[in-house]
């Protein structure tokens, strides 16, 4: 029975890892559908290569930073059949698929950032940023929340009466990724021609609405692996997380539909806004609380995107700061409201714990984003030159466009 249980848990977590890995194709198509045609190839290549760099950085450095575990032992130890220096990995290679699962979360950080910096970022400096963020800065905060590194969770529980609840990463993954992206976007500056000299906004329409919609659908489906399988065992899995994720998603869609006046970009991103926000409290909320949280996130995304682009003149191409940063922050705090027993939740959470943990994550990520991208801007430069940006990242970086036959005929 023990062997069966360990094998079942390995398969369960592995399927979660595969579902979240598939979400990265959603990031790719969401970006490819939003950017101009001359930058579609770059969007697809960037997400895939970022995933590869993230895997290497997290395997050799990041996982150890977060959890104090490294894989520099023989395969028998990794598979759980032998121990080394008094430490034993779990049976059936469970710790290996757990790494795979958590690595796909870590790789979401550069995938989030990618959408904000699209169309004008240099390729190699961004890969260096990916290695730094996934190898060091993301796992530092990940370990604080999910492994109680530095006594962070113990301090919050002692001070506010409950630990910081971020079940599937509204703050650890999404808010951190979104607020790091803010620093990257500001350091890069707006795309050429995005804003006229008089301050008016030049509209740049999406290149492909079906690609954008496909990206949203892939992400939405994969999100149920992201959230439900964060239990990391069959024993811990609960349908409450699934129904809360569903309710938050539809709440985000409907709110964005109304607030965005039927705009398809807002509708499809509204689904993602709701899912971002429910991650933190999906294990403790009542489904109605999840619906309200998702609807609030859908409205917040529309407002945040419009303010970002039109008033604050921050050229965040896919709106990753409002989508992941703002909605992730909302979700972290909402878990401390709709997770309370008085509002139908399971309890075990505190509003002040959620507020404090969320604000620490936001402040940390903001400092990291401006520091990493500011440092790279100073040392290497992070933006394509004007001619390369005009020609598009596809030709400038990859020497091929998204539609080569048309380029030949032209």
Image: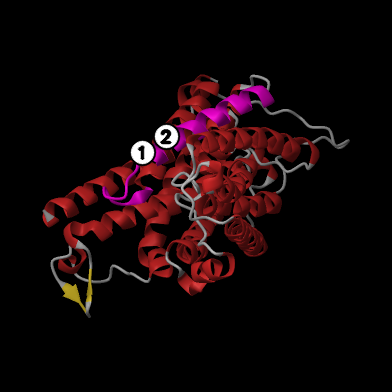
Q: What x and y, as percent, mark residue 229?
A: 35, 45
What residue is pinned by disc 1? 239
Whether residue 232 appears in magenta in the rendering, the answer is: yes
Q: What x and y, as percent, mark residue 180?
A: 60, 54
- The quarter of the picture where residue 63 lies is bottom left
The structure residue drawn at horizontal position 62% and vertical position 56%, both measured from the top left corner, is 355
Q: What x and y, as percent, mark residue 133?
A: 51, 60
In terms of depth relative to the viewer, which is nearer, 301 or 344? 344
The structure residue drawn at horizontal position 51% and vertical position 47%, both measured from the top left corner, is 341
Determine whether 322 is above or below 288 in the image.
Answer: below
Whether residue 348 appears in magenta in the rendering, the answer is: no
The structure residue drawn at horizontal position 55% and vertical position 51%, both measured from the top left corner, is 177
The secondary structure type at the circle numbered 1 is helix
Q: Residues within 10 Å of mark 2 (few under 14, many from 20)?
A: some
Checking the image for residue 279, the label placed there is none
Residue extent of the magenta highlight: 230-259
What residue is pinned by disc 2? 243
Q: Are marks 2 and 1 in contact (CB under 8 Å)?
A: yes
In terms of depth relative to the viewer, which is nearer, 246 or 118? 246
Q: What x and y, as percent, mark residue 276?
A: 53, 42
Q: CA distance from mark 2 to mark 1?
A: 6 Å
Q: Residues within 10 Å of mark 1 (few under 14, many from 20)?
A: few
The secondary structure type at the circle numbered 2 is helix
In terms of depth relative to the viewer, which is nearer, 327 or 123? 327
- Left or right of 298, for residue 41: left
């Amino acid at each position: 029975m023990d062997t069966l249980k360990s094998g079942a848990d390995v398969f369960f977590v592995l399927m979660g890892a595969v579902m979240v890995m598939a979400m990265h194709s959603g990031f790719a198509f969401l970006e490819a559908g939003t950017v101009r045609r001359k930058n579609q190839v770059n969007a697809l290549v960037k997400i895939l290569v970022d995933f590869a760099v993230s895997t290497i950085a997290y395997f050799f450095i990041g996982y150890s930073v977060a959890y104090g575990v490294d894989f520099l032992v023989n395969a028998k130890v990794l598979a759980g059949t032998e121990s080394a220096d008094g430490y034993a990995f779990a049976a059936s290679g469970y710790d290996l698929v757990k790494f795979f699962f958590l690595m796909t979360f870590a790789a979401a950080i550069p995938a989030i950032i990618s959408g904000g910096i699209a169309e004008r970022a240099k390729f190699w400096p961004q890969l260096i940023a990916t290695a730094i963020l996934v190898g060091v800065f993301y796992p530092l905060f990940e370990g604080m929340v999910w492994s109680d590194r530095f006594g962070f969770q113990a301090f919050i529980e002692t001070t506010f009466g409950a630990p910081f609840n971020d079940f599937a990463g509204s703050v650890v993954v999404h808010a951190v990724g979104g607020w790091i992206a803010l620093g990257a976007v500001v350091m890069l500056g707006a795309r050429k021609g995005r804003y006229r000299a008089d301050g008016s906004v030049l509209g740049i329409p999406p290149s492909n609405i079906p690609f954008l919609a496909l990206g949203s659908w892939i992400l939405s489906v994969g999100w149920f692996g992201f959230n439900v399988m964060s239990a990391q065992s069959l024993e811990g899995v609960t349908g409450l997380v699934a129904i809360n994720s569903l309710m938050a998603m539809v709440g985000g869609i409907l709110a964005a539909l109304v607030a965005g006046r039927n705009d398809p970009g807002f509708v499809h991103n509204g689904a993602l806004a709701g899912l971002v926000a429910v991650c933190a409290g999906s294990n403790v909320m009542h489904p109605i609380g999840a619906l309200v949280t998702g609807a609030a996130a859908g409205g917040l995304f529309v407002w945040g995107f419009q303010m970002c682009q039109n008033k604050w003149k921050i050229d965040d191409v896919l709106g990753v700061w409002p989508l992941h940063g703002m909605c992730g922050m909302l979700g972290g705090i909402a878990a401390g409201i709709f997770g309370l027993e008085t509002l139908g939740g399971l309890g075990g959470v505190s509003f002040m714990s959620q507020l404090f943990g969320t604000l620490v994550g936001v402040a940390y990520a903001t400092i990291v984003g401006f520091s990493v991208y500011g440092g790279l801007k100073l040392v290497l430069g992070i933006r394509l030159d004007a001619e390369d940006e005009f020609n598009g990242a596809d030709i400038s970086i990859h020497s091929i466009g998204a539609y080569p036959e048309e380029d030949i005929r032209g």
